[in-house]
Amino acid sequence: MIRHAACEKFKSFWECPLEDAQNEGVFSKPFKHLILPDFIEDVETLSSIQKQLLSLDFHEKSNDLYKFRQSSDLKNVESGPVSELKNNLYNQFRKWLIEVTGIKLNATVDVSCAQYSSTDVLLCHDDELEGRRIAFIFYLVDENWTADDGGTLDLYSSDEHGDPVKIAKRIIPKKNTLVLFEVTPISYHQVSEVLSEKVRLSVSGWFHGSSLPRPPLRLEKPSQPEKPEILEQEDYFDWINSSYMNPEAQGDIQEHFEQNSEIQLQDFLNENIQKALREALCTSDDIQWEDMGPPNKRSYGVCKNTNSIMERTRDFFSSELMLLLLSNMTGLRLHPLAPESDEDDEVAVGQESEDGASGSKRKSRPDESQSKKTKLECKKEEELPTEPIVEWRRFQHGNYTLLHDSETSKLGHSLMLMYYIADNQWEQEWGGFTSFIAKAENEELLTVVPKHNCLALIYCCPATLSFVKHINNKSSNRKFFVLNGYYSEVNKDLKTYGVHDTENEDSDVSNE
């Protein structure tokens, strides 16, 4: 059934791969992989396999890393051509792989079938999971599949730290072709987004054996907080929609926030400010954006040369007056002049209170005199305002963040702020929304969809994880911009971001 290539030839190539230009089926760059065309000898058998696979039940799978439809494990298929294919993979082909690669494989083989349709994707990952040694993909796509259809298997090069850098090779799916590679700490790859209405059908899985040693996790340098800016009272009132400056309104906002641990405030900045920001971000060609990676954690643009209105906006959201306003709206003590609160009463998104309810307990309504202070002086010399992390980001087609890049889990208990500028009405089906989940239960707690001139406030704890969903091609050339901010409370044990006790936290995320 399966066409077995000459074992000795492939064995010699695997041990000493030729340059890719030689095109002998075994390739060394960016990491060792094997491409076997015409894998099934009989055309009728190939057609029967495809027909049986399409008759299986498929289930939607979607999270931060992927979106596609997958069958159950093919080990449950006990008859027909798919069963014959599976048995060949388990036995004859596994023995051939052992001889060619020299890798000791055991009897465990995972096999399933996947369908990728328009906008489906599997983002950058390395496949490393206990026991996986060789990954394989067998393509059953349309005969006329091209690069324009998407769905390519993209292989990444890695840097000296073992992090993926960029796509070094794209393998276009071809019917009746088997691709396999050794699973290693640098076997980073992705299935690019399917761009057409064709269906990318494949059989894939892993041959198992003893896992390779994994290098120690490299910690990234934490973002540096910024010293709060001093703004005059007139500037303060010029920026914010007047409806949010009323102490009674701030009290209502605080009550909602303390019950739900989140709130989204529409039309937050005054019209002239948001219009200036939209024009600067959406139409200016002078702003430089740097792509942030590595791609197994994140992909978005960070502004490197803000213009005056963007700089002023960042300073505004970092200002001491803003810290006081956020304290009024949330009940959190982000500035020494904010009222004292009982830390034990605070409950974040993803955290349960003692009575089983979610959200924070009621603190005090804001004092009108507090919002009118123009000169900010600390009550005690050792009490300093929190130093926030505030950053402009750009999201467009292909951008995302993944769960194991979750800033909310790294910052401890903190207030997360997201202020959005969008050039068009953003639709949730395009992706780009921020999803918050509880770490222990993997339960979705909240979804925040980008909306122009909207301020989202979320109180997070280390058990709160978040990700920005991959933005698909339905977004066309649209983009949105978000000012991300993170604020910690004063008089906390942890006074700066990026430093908290993770000794007992499980930070592993399994890639499928």
Image (cartoon, rainbow, N blue to C red):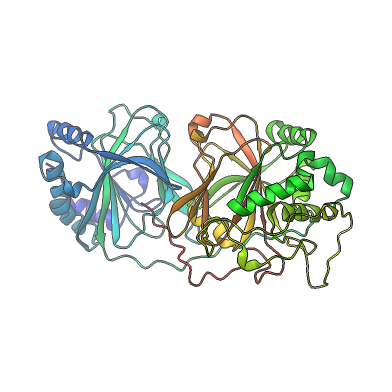
Q: In the displayed structure, does residue 282 sit left or right of residue 440?
A: right
Rendered view: 109 above or below 477: below
Q: Between residues 426 and 247, which one lies in front from this camera angle?
A: 247
Residue at the spot 53% in from the left edge and 29% down from the top edge: 476
Q: Between residues 188 and 447, which one lies in front from this camera angle?
A: 447
Quarter of the image where one finds residue 41? top left
Q: Residue furthest front?
A: 355
Q: Residue 67: percent from the left, percent from the top?
A: 40, 41
Residue at the spot 66% in from the left edge and 35% down from the top edge: 452
Residue at the spot 49% in from the left edge and 32% down from the top edge: 473
Residue at the spot 32% in from the left edge and 36% down from the top edge: 173
Q: Residue 92: percent from the left, percent from the top?
A: 13, 52
Rendered view: 291 above or below 106: above
Question: Can residue 3 be seen at all in this image of the molecule?
Answer: no
Quadrant location of the N terminus in the rendered image: top left
Q: In the displayed structure, does residue 307 sit left or right of residue 63?
A: right
Total marks in image: 0
Q: In the displayed structure, does residue 170 sit left or right of residue 36?
A: right
Question: Can residue 271 be seen at all in this image of the molecule?
Answer: yes
Q: Residue 293: percent from the left, percent from the top?
A: 55, 51
Quarter of the image where one finds residue 49? top left
Q: Residue 209: percent from the left, percent from the top?
A: 25, 63
Q: Between residues 234 and 112, which one lies in front from this camera angle?
A: 234
